[in-house]
Structure formats: C-alpha cells, structure tokens
Amino acid sequence: MEYQIREAKREDMPKVLELIMELAKHENAENEVEISVKDLETEGFDHGNFKCFVADVDGKLAGMALVYFRFSTWKGRTVHLEDLIVTETMRGTGLGGALYNQVVKYGYEHGVKRVEWVVSEGNKNAIEFYENTGADIKKNWYTVHMNESVIKKNIQK
C-alpha cells in the first residue's frame, strides 16, 4: 500500500465530510453532524480556523486529521486534535498512526507545549495506541459541552 500524508486542499472537503459522517455513523451519532462542505471550506481555508491533514491512498482519501491551535493558561499555545478518522477498510494498516505522527510533528514544528485531544472511553484500541505512544490520558477530567439551545438559554438570563 502506497500512501501520502499531506495538507488538505479545499477540493478535499467533500471527502473530509464523508469521513466525518463515517465516524458519526460508527458512533451512532449521524444526526448530530450539522457542518457542511461550505462550512469546512469557509472555516478552514477562508478564515484559517483549522488545518487538516489527509491520507491519500492510491489517489483516494482514506483518512484525515483536523487540528487547530488553542491557548492554555498553564502551558501557552497548544494544538488540539479534533478528529482523526480512517476509513473502516483502512483501519489497522498503520494509516491512522501516520496521521497521528503528522499531527505530533505539526505541533513540534510550531513549538507548542502540548498536543491534546479527546478519546471516547469505549475506543479501547485508540486508548491503547495513545498510551503506547506515551500520551497521558486524563481519566479524572471531563469534557464539557454546551449546545446551541443551552447557549441561548444562558444569554437570556
């Protein structure tokens, strides 16, 4: 298998959205995806809100990793890995590891103090992989989300 990890281009965004939908389906959360190709194009390429790396296998996109910079009051600038997705047929081939390594390299090249992400407690394979790379999984921290309707409720108080 020959593959290339590269920065995504605007024209890759339809396939990136397909990968996002594949992950959502795997997580039984297809109805939660609200983003569109236009959103990805605008936010990633017009506004520069994220960087996306893709895995190109024999001319077809088979994986992606989407990252953006954050700021930690304890560490300074960090890179957040929002999603790393590999098509089901390519899982276990090393493609996910190659994307992961690209994200770590990107963080290093930008001098960040930390690369961070969230992993589902049910994703045992990913947890084991991350731990084997030396990543520290913070089991005593919670991810907190506030959806759009709750945001609106809170601003009306």
Image (tube, rainbow, N blue to C red):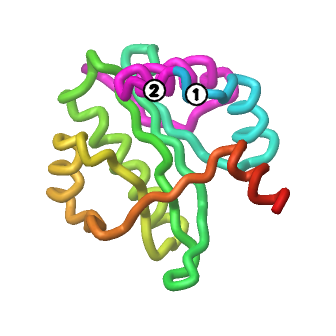
> Residue 113: x and y, percent?
46, 76
Q: Residue furthest right?
A: 156
- Name the residue that disc number 2 marks: 29
> Residue 65: x and y, percent?
46, 40
Which class describes the residues within 10 Å of circle 2: few (<14), some (14-19), or many (20+)?
A: few
Relative placement, left or right, of 149 versus 33 is right
> Residue 125: x and y, percent?
17, 41
Secondary structure of the residue carrying tag 1 is: loop
Is residue 139 a member of the stretch shown in magenta?
no
The residue segment tinted magenta is 1-30
- Front position in the image: 75 or 148: 148
Q: Can residue 56 be seen in the rendering of this structure?
A: no
The answer to whether marks 1 and 2 mark residues whose Cβ atoms lie closer than 8 Å is yes
Question: Vertically, is 94 above or below 74?
Answer: above
Amino acid identity at mark 1: Val
Question: Vertically, is 106 above or below 99?
Answer: below
- Name the residue that disc number 1 marks: 33
Residue 5 figure quarter: top left
Question: Vertically, is 75 above or below 9?
Answer: below
Q: Residue furthest front?
A: 157
Q: Residue at x 55, y 28 (%)?
A: 32
> Residue 49: x and y, percent?
70, 49
- Front position in the image: 96 or 118: 118
